[in-house]
Amino acid sequence: MENGVEGDEAVCVLGGFADSDSAESRALIAGLSESHLVDKDREKATERFLFIMDKYQEQPHLLDPHLEWMLNMLLEQIRSEQSPPPLVHLAFKFLYVISKVRGHKIFMQLLPHEVSDVHPVLDLLSRQNPKDHQTWETRYMLLLWLSMTCLIPFDLSRLDGHLTSESGQAREPIMDRILAIAKSYLTVCDSSRDAASILVSKFLTRLDVKQKRLGDFLDWSLTIISCRHMILMYTLLMLTALSPPAPTVLQCLDKRRLAESNQTVLRKLGIKLVQRLGLTLLKPRLAKWRYQRGSRSLAANLSQPTKVTEQAQSKVENGDLEQATQEEDYDIPEEIENVIEQLLVGLKDKETIVRWSAAKGIGRVTGRLPVELADEVVASVLECFSFQETDNAWHGGCLALAELGRRGLLLPSRLPDVVPLILKALMYDEKRGACSVGTNVRDSACYVCWAFARAYDPVELKPFVTQIASALVITTVFDRNVNCRRAASAAFQENVGRQGTFPHGIDILTLADYYAVGNLSNCYQMISVYIASFPEYTKPMIDHLVQLLLLPVLPQLLTMATNMDLHGRHGAILACAEIIYALYKLGSPTDRPVTDFLSAGSVEELKCIHQKVSLCHLCFVSVFAFFCALIEKMSLSRMPFHKDPIIVGWQWLIDDSLKSLHLFSSGARQGIKESAVSALSALCQEYYQVKPDVADPDMQEQLVTQYIAGLRSPEVLTRCGCALALGSLPRFMIRSKLQQILEGLQEICRITQKDVTFAESRKDAATAIAQVYATAGVSTQGSPDSFLCLNNVTKVYGALLDCMNDYTTDSRGDVGSWVREAAMTSLMDVTFLVVASDPELLTPDCERMMCCLAQQAAEKIDRCRAHAGTIFLDLLHSKNPVVPHIPHREELLAIFPVAVPLNWKAPSEAFPHITQLLRLPRYQYHTLLGLTVSVGGLTASTVCFSSQSLFDYLKGIQQDRHMLEQFSATLLQIFRDHLSNDRVFIPLLKMLDQMLARGCFDGFTSEENHMFCIDILALCKEGIKRSKDVEKLRSSFIQTEFFQGEVRKKVLFQLLLLLCHPYPVIRKTTASQVYEMLLMYDDVIDPAVMDEVMTELSDTNWEGDLTMVRSHRNQLCDLLGVQRPTVVAKVTDGQSSAKSGQL
């Protein structure tokens, strides 16, 4: 196998039929006599042979030198009289696999076709059952074989011998037998009918059979043609070379009305049959009047001077055309009109494969017609390009024109009629309800342009170069369908290479290649701007975008913004916004206002456009985002609407957008929210200042109060919108209101019982806190109501750091991670803001922030870990400004060097670095807390790499008693702090179990009654007390049997208590745990009772009735010398109830 590289793709090329494949194939074929006996071996051999052959699907010619020996080996087993039927069928299945890979046309030529083969093949085929679906490969190959044997150059009647058998009964002639078998297989539903059609086509074209049986067979075929016998159509296709029956077949097809059939394949075969019939009715000659560009030989083209080529092309346009017409003048059968009509109808079919077949038929038939009739066909094809026709007709017409042009049948004199229609097809787009059609039309129009580039001399297309080039460029960069853009790019490239007359062709192709036009955003924002810099394309591109030719741009867009077309309205509103802002930037260097570029009427319409659309009641909700974008651009463009009542309407629209987010679809919410917030900021900046940097007090009070009140809305999305609105307010709007805003945002950052699932609002509130203080700025001794200062910095960090503890989960998963990520980003922004002004403000908060980031960087969610790790390193490596007060800075820089990139999303890279933070005392608690949920998690890769890194660290400190005790103390502290937090408690138990199993604490567990062991047991008991969580209870079965001394006996007592737990699964798991413990440690009980205890544990049904289980548990207590648990009386309201002891 050889590997080659072409372009950017690796190409795998086979050098030949590998020796290993050849040897294995030979072994498989030779072993068929044994493998056919067992179904499993038969299936295995077939699958293996199929696997070998499939490797050569792309290069089947490599099998040619080996086909003969494979065929001979298989035929030897088929011909053997000792071969049972299963072996014969298996051999034919192998033959079919070879035929499928190499192709039946090549492979069937190798089949034996001697006279002696006719009768055996025919007899074997006669014995087959057409309804046996397991052996269809046998019938398929036999029909192919028979189609080869019937080509013998002898009259078939010579093979009949005496038609009277020994019993006196007449035998059927071999010609009738073959025809009967072929007819029977033409109506089956498997692949045998394909082989039967090949048999019929070869059999009936024999001279002797044609004279005796062709007429009868055609009558039979035409009689039973129906929707259920499509293969007969294919058979007739094979027979259409026989001219005499063509009119009869054509009349039958007219009666059957195949064009109205619901079956696509039947209509396609009908079109192919009609065009073949048309070809048989016409003389098989090539039209001398056709247009020819140069020679088919590249060497001949290069050797001929340009003038000679031009003279050759002019022949058709001058006297030679008349001479060619006279030579081609002969009678055309009347049936040709019917053929052409059916092909033209096929061009309008609803299926592409039918239209494509009809287009090719048009090209083939037209090539045999005189020039006058061919021109009439072209005129009929051009009638497809009417706006009364459907997109199917346009598509079929384009395909037909491409075929005619490619074959030289579309003379240059027709180009003035054709090119305008092709230009319309390149822009074809028809609305159908909520969607539109026309993609296939535009794609086929690109194909026409591609075909014309290859078919015509540059002189012929020169008058149309500008139009075609502009249309192709527009389709390349502005079409919404990626296939159309790429097709237009390919057509443009073909024209540049073949014609060489397209303006700036090479420069455009360098940027607008096949891959570049795949990105629609890149097409609009980059490629289109570059191409528009060429004057030949500027005006056509602008005209296309605005969809007009003569009228001024903006007034027409304003009209489109209020029409019935929803999509056009959206585009017009956005276009107005961008045009206004572009005019502002154009006039800003000279302080020229936007109104100088606009008429008074346009300004008035822009001001009131949202009111007009609202009066139309046409999906007003769906244009909120576009109106917000328009408001933003007009505010940024400083439109002269100060003190105008329209500002109140704009403010209402923005507020309504933020309050109505829950009414929009989930996909549109984010865009509307961002547009509204951006519009609010621009609106306030321009229209709510009474003088520079001084807010209108009434609007300031109104907006701040309104948005703070919205933070308490029962709608989570309204809270989100109001939070981001507060974050977007300019500095003069939040001055003297900062404390009030912070309290409101801090309030919704807290998790309460009624809004625990409002993670989105907490996320946006955390983002808004950083935005507010980034806008307000830092002043160490400033007022907390106007700046981030000494008096409120701790409160700001406290609110954001509290968000780092949001681990809310719901049906969407860990939605608290959204809040944590937003809080991390806000912490970084606020930190850089503070450090740039007064680094000393960070003194009490920097350590906690870095520890929280280290915890998040050690947790299990890849996205959250990557976000935290990136921010951690950004703060650590920051040099301008340098973040002070980071604990253990030098050690951290040694762990995380600046020059070494780190993929935080990859557990294999992240955790080996994270675990090194355990050596640093200030980071140990939070890092171990984060590692706990990773090591005790569920994701295999995270668990594997985090646990391995943690155990490597513990292995390294085994000899350091002080560090090991410090680590164990931190672990116990995490245990105590999270006894009631299942998110940490359950993974902690799983992690502790792994630590004990790996001997990480052997230094403690080997000592009798070590305090670490006592504390672990006590914390386990406390954590699962009165718990009904099965997962939590099962996680508590950690490796406590490693403990020595009295602790182990206490462990045994607690396990015996759990043997009577109310949950049967816990009782069963406990029994298994006790059994393993006694099996591993024989010093726990007296060896004399060991067998009896083990039998009691293994034979008792611990999932049975609790009363019975309790008796067995008590018996175990007696055998182990452990005090029986006593029933505790629980007194409630003067009544007592018995309850068994629990952990």
Image: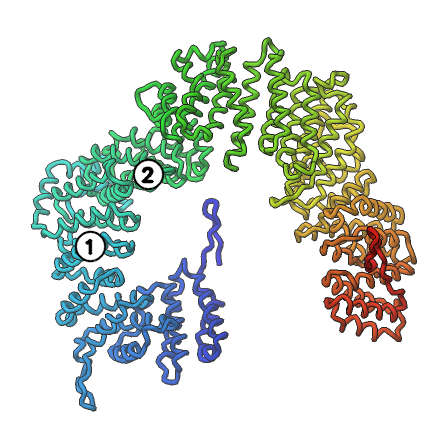
Which image quarter: residue 375?
Answer: top left
* Mark found first going from the N terminus, 1 or 2: 1
Pinpoint residue 481: horizontal percent, then vertical percent: 39, 39
Which image quarter: residue 710?
Answer: top right
Q: Is residue 814 visible?
A: yes
- Could you say which disc has been placed on residue 240 in the image? none
Q: Nearer the viewer, mark 1 or mark 2?
A: 1
Q: Is residue 450 visible?
A: no
Q: State the residue position of label 1.
A: 257
Left or right of 328 on screen, residue 1095:
right
- Residue at x-position 52% and y-position 31%: 671
Q: Nearer the viewer, residue 289 or 163?
A: 163
Q: How is the image coloured?
A: rainbow
- Residue at x-position 48% and y-position 78%: 38
Q: Give the alpha-carbon distance from disc 1 to disc 2, as whole Å.
A: 31 Å
Q: State the residue position of label 2.
A: 442
Pinpoint residue 512: horizontal percent, then vertical percent: 42, 34
Task: Check disc 2: other Cα within 10 Å, few if <14, some if 14-19, many if 20+.
Answer: many
Pinpoint residue 276: horizontal percent, then vertical percent: 19, 55
Q: Nearer the viewer, residue 84 or 258?
A: 258
SS at badge 1: loop
Left or right of 720 on screen, residue 877:
right
Q: Nearer the viewer, residue 700 or 210?
A: 700
As displayed, is residue 1110 above or below residue 246? below
Q: Quadrant of the C terminus?
A: bottom right
- Residue at x-position 46% and y-position 31%: 622
Callout 1 amino acid:
Arg
As displayed, is residue 168 above or below residue 937? below
Callout 2 amino acid:
Arg
